[in-house]
Amino acid sequence: MNIHEYQGKQMLKSFGVTIQEGIVAETPERAVEAAKELTKNTGTGMWVIKAQIHAGGRGKGGGVKLAKSLDEVKELAKKMIGMTLVTHQTGPEGKEVHKILIAQDVYYPGESEISEFYMSVLLNRQTGRNVVMYSTEGGMDIETVAEKTPHLIFREEVDPRVGLLPFQARRIAFNLGLSGKAFKEMTRFVTALYMAYEKTDSSLFEINPVLKTSDDRILAVDCKVNLDDNALFRHKDYIELRDLAEEDPAEVEASKNDLNFIKLDGNVGCMVNGAGLAMATMDIIKLSGGDPANFLDVGGTANAETVEAGFRIILQEPNVKAILVNIFGGIVRCDRVAQGVVDAYHKVGDIPVPVIVRLQGTNAEEGKKLIDDSGLKVYSAITLQEAADKVKDLVG
Amino acid sequence: MSVLVNKDSKVIVQGFTGSEGSFHAGQMIEYGTNVVGGVTPGKGGQTHLDRPVFNTVNEAVEQTGTDVSVIFVPPPFAADAIMEAVDAGIKVIVTITEGIPTQDMVKVKEYLTGHSSRLIGPNCPGIITADEAKVGIMPGFIFRKGSVGIVSRSGTLTYEAVDQVTKAGLGQTTAIGIGGDPIIGTSTLDAVKMFMNDPETEGIIMIGEIGGNMEADAAEWIRDYGSKPVVGFIAGQTAPKGRRMGHAGAIIGGKADTAAAKMAIMRECGIHVVESPAHIGETMARALKKD
């Protein structure tokens, strides 16, 4: 589950990670109040207005602006709330901005030089351990850094028995070229950050940039937090951090029906039991000359209710020219699935596109016969190749 | 021979009396697996499916001599169940449970070092050695004893491959579902090595998906040490970057873990890569004839 920058920062702060302070607002009036409050709390003379969407690259897309007066806060807030922000991560359709974060100005001039770093905590899948990845090259896309200057990316792997150790925190601060007060602040920062990552059951923390201010403080200026969905059972309070406005409506509806759905932009819808087979089915659609319109895993029980919900969600997309249902009946019997498909078809009413139903496994022949005798605009198949050929006939 | 489990394996079920555990234990027994009992804390002393229930894995080991455990314990308690089995010295621990928190698995992974247990999964369909033992949830009827070893990260896609292999007239030695999570006990390479060392296995099918670099690791080892034909498929050629495709581990993070990149490496390493999942069985049949 992804959460907003403002939510992530509050989460970090509760674990003692120092952050760029801010207050979230949903109207220009509230933005001005927030700015005043922030000045009272932090003494900031300027305010950074940041669009809260679940995507990076906001700065370049016009989603981060500096306001030098309260009038400017109001003006920028007016412009930003409701705007459609397009960044390299949102896709061309962009995302509508519903909330903005009014944040303190932390790039104020002072005695020492300001620097920006990159820092993330994530899982190293190869070793099965958590790793702190960091770089002196902050404020830019880490993939670009990895490509152009890979020697400027450092990693500190954490032994789960002891956690991030003080010497590792010092090594990080040394590698970032820090000394004096900033050095100490950084060791504290990274120790708290790692603690927060573990305690929140996150799968990714990405702080870009981590800022060293002109008075040698270390602050998280942005943050991307990805929570492990599988661990939400022990963090019930995090469930309310989910922002449904940030998700695709079809995906939200699917999740209500316990379906695992991801919208894509092709012309052949598909409905499959099992994630691996679902991806393989998408691949087959592509190889047959179509383009998958979605990923949809109906899970272990492909019954009339789930299939009906699946049809309805897929059919919301006007580009869909055909639907391929691919079920491998292991424990679940194919004739039962076939009856479910026929029932669902009748319930949905007129399905305007051809449906191919491929059933393989227990009672596959009986399932095929049920489909063939149904009188519906449904083609049956048993082998994957037959299904592929049918897709080719219809859209290839 | 075969790998990991056979007709002599003494299997216990952790989460024996729960609905999932009960159902699949019944199916395993029906397949002919030697299920010697189960563990449900607090229900020790009872009998379930005509087999004894124990409070702890230790008790089960002492009284039955079990060496294989299959875990159906719900996600919040599954990591603990795995570590209990490790502590009791179980040799092969098959974890079916889906949805175990990643940080729990970080601890499990660490706990396994220094112990001799082999963990399969989590979030996997289990293992079948055809006609001998079924430890997990795979449908038994699609298997036929034969010469092909199968390793896969997914469930139904494994069944698809098994079914194609059976219909191609080859049959299987053992099929191992290693699971779709970011941290799993047995990697593609671990499974490939076992099959290369198994005299009954003549050919290997390796089914991967986007995310991670397990398939690339296995491919490079096969290039250097492989002695049997390997057919490979990677699911997710059309998956978008950064989206989790059902499995917690199936997510494209960078250029190296796309399906295209993995397939390219596998091809370079001499693996018979199929573009279409419909061609897995026939490609294996052809590879076995040629080699």
Image (tube, rainbow, N blue to C red):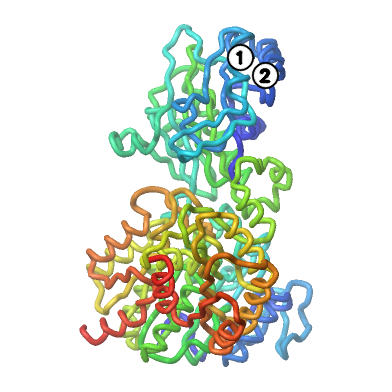
Say which residue appears at 44% left-offset and 75% top-offset.
Answer: A387
User: Nearest the camera: A320 or A125?
Assistant: A320
Say which residue appears at 51% left-offset and 10% top-offset.
Answer: A108
Dot 2 falls on which chain? A
Q: CA distance from mark 1 to mark 2?
A: 8 Å
Dot 1 falls on which chain? A
Whether pointer 1 and pointer 2 mark residues with C-beta atoms closer than 8 Å, the reply is yes
Q: Is residue B25 left or right of residue A283?
A: right
**Which mark is drawn over residue A75?**
1
Q: Is residue B230 in view?
A: yes
B46 w.r.t. A259: above or below? below
A33 w.r.t. A127: above or below? above
Say which residue appears at 71% left-offset and 17% top-offset.
Answer: A29
The part of the image, by quadrant, that contains residue B68 is bottom right
Label 1 SS: helix
User: Nearest the camera: A164 or B247?
Assistant: B247
Residue A323 locus on image (x, y percent): 52, 67
> Counting other residues with Cα less than 10 Å from the Cα at mark 2, is it few (<14), some (14-19), or many (20 or more)?
some
A394 w.r.t. A187: above or below? below
Residue B121 locus on image (x, y percent): 52, 68
For badge 2, the amino acid type reads Pro
Residue A141 locus on image (x, y percent): 40, 33
Q: Which residue is mark 2?
A: A28
- Looking at the picture, do discs 1 and 2 lie on one chain? yes
